[in-house]
Image (cartoon, rainbow, N blue to C red):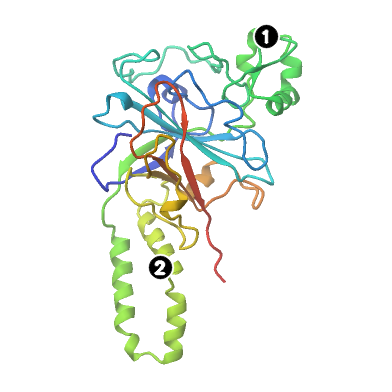
């Protein structure tokens, strides 16, 4: 997802895709499954991927491929978003950025092939080219090893226990087939994120603006008590939510909005962060808005246990305005969660 002209917006949609399109060497934007890590060394460890509230391992939610044109050190650039899906918590969120020059030790200098690989197997790759092993359950860094087979790797005790309960107890002796038996119970359903440009003005937004003007023009003819009722109805909260609805009306299936440096599309007038609420990058630069995750994504996650599962109004991701150079490492950025405000 290349950076576009100032103030332009790219809309992201979830689509099913062949497995080969979602591998690291294809530089995908995707939802769910295991992360398709960009840099294959310096991955965030189990501590960095633990929920700050309950301490349990976070689940991979999505990644966005967002290179920066004109930046040799960010020819490849991806953002990785993780969330807690452990009820009753489901509150933790963390996001990481990684970027690489075109010439690097992991990928070809030439663009990836547009055709699928010859292999069609279902095996899961749980060891990176760098030699790092990945957790069988979540696909994140796996420093812990099964004491029996010495071949199954985990991010920690939680996922080792889960895998043992889900079948590793029986498969442990069949170490040659471990990749084929990797569990997917912890993972969100996997989709490719495909993008298209958003039109600047939609018919819905024009109609709402027209209706709002007609209401304003007729106010002098209303009784005082009717004016009071209208003022309550047309509150700032309601206006912001109506703007949100009008913006997404033409493309109601959008799960993501990308626009580096623009303003987020807030769903509510409450809990909007001020500049002081967005921490600076450790390099000293300010952070700028880059993309937001829309509530429509929840429909694809099969997270339907109301009140006890992942939920949000929007998730707004802010990244270093300088996109500071990090070599092959991952750096944490900032995500702001805005929930839908209940109106009486």
Q: Position of residue 271 (x, y in %)?
A: 50, 58
Considering the numbered disc 1 on the image, is that residue within a helix, a strand or a loop? helix
User: In the rendered image of this protein, does residue 104 appear above or below residue 29?
Assistant: above
Q: Which mark is residue 107?
A: none
Which part of the image, by quadrant, shows the C terminus?
bottom right
Q: Is residue 309 left or right of residue 295?
A: right
| Quarter where residue 289 is shown | top left
Q: Which mark is residue 175?
A: 1
Q: Position of residue 324 (x, y in %)?
A: 36, 31
Which part of the image, by quadrant, shows the N terminus?
top left
Q: Earlier in the sequence, mark 1 or mark 2?
A: 1
Considering the numbered disc 2 on the image, is that residue within a helix, a strand or a loop? helix
Q: Identify the residue at horizontal 26%, vertical 53% (top origin).
A: 200
Front residue (pair 107, 179): 107
Front residue (pair 189, 10): 10
The crowding category of the residue bearing disc 1, from other C-alpha atoms within 10 Å (few below 14, some 14 to 19, many at least 20), is some
**Numbered marks: total:** 2
User: Marks 1 and 2, how far apart in space?
Assistant: 59 Å
Q: Identify the residue at horizontal 52%, vertical 11% (top origin).
A: 131
Q: Identify the residue at horizontal 53%, vertical 38% (top origin).
A: 94
The crowding category of the residue bearing disc 2, from other C-alpha atoms within 10 Å (few below 14, some 14 to 19, many at least 20), is some
Q: Is residue 292 left or right of residue 5?
A: right
Q: Is residue 303 left or right of residue 191?
A: right
Q: Which mark is residue 239?
A: 2
């Amino acid at each position: 997802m290349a950076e576009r002209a100032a103030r332009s917006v790219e809309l992201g949609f979830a689509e099913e895709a062949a497995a080969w399109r979602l591998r690291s060497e294809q530089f995908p934007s995707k939802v769910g499954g295991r992360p398709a890590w960009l840099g294959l060394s310096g991955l965030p460890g189990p501590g960095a991927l633990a929920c700050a509230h309950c301490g349990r391992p976070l689940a991979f939610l999505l990644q966005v491929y967002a290179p920066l044109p004109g930046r040799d050190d960010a020819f490849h650039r991806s953002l990785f978003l993780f969330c807690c899906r452990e009820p009753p918590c489901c509150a933790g969120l963390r996001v990481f950025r990684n970027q690489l020059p075109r010439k690097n030790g992991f990928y070809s200098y030439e663009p990836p092939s547009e055709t699928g690989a010859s292999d069609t197997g279902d095996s899961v790759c749980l060891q990176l080219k760098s030699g790092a092993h990945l957790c069988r359950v979540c696909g994140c860094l796996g420093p812990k090893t099964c004491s029996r087979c010495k071949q199954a790797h985990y991010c920690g005790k939680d996922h080792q226990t889960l895998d043992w309960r889900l079948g590793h107890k029986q498969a442990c002796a069949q170490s040659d087939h471990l990749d084929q038996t990797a569990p997917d119970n912890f993972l969100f359903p996997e989709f490719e994120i495909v993008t298209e440009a958003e039109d600047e003005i939609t018919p819905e937004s024009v109609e709402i603006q027209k209706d709002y003007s007609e209401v304003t023009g007729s106010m002098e003819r209303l009784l005082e008590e009717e004016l009071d009722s209208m003022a309550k109805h047309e509150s700032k909260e309601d206006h912001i939510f109506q703007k949100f609805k009008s913006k997404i009306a033409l493309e109601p299936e959008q799960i993501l909005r990308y626009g580096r440096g623009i303003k987020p599309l807030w769903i509510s007038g409450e809990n909007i962060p001020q500049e002081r609420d967005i921490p600076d990058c450790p390099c000293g630069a300010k952070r700028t808005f880059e993309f937001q995750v829309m509530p429509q994504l929840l429909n694809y996650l099969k997270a339907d246990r109301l009140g006890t599962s992942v939920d949000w109004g929007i998730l707004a991701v802010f990244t270093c305005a300088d996109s500071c150079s990090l070599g092959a490492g991952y750096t944490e950025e900032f995500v702001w969660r805005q929930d839908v405000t209940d109106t009486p």
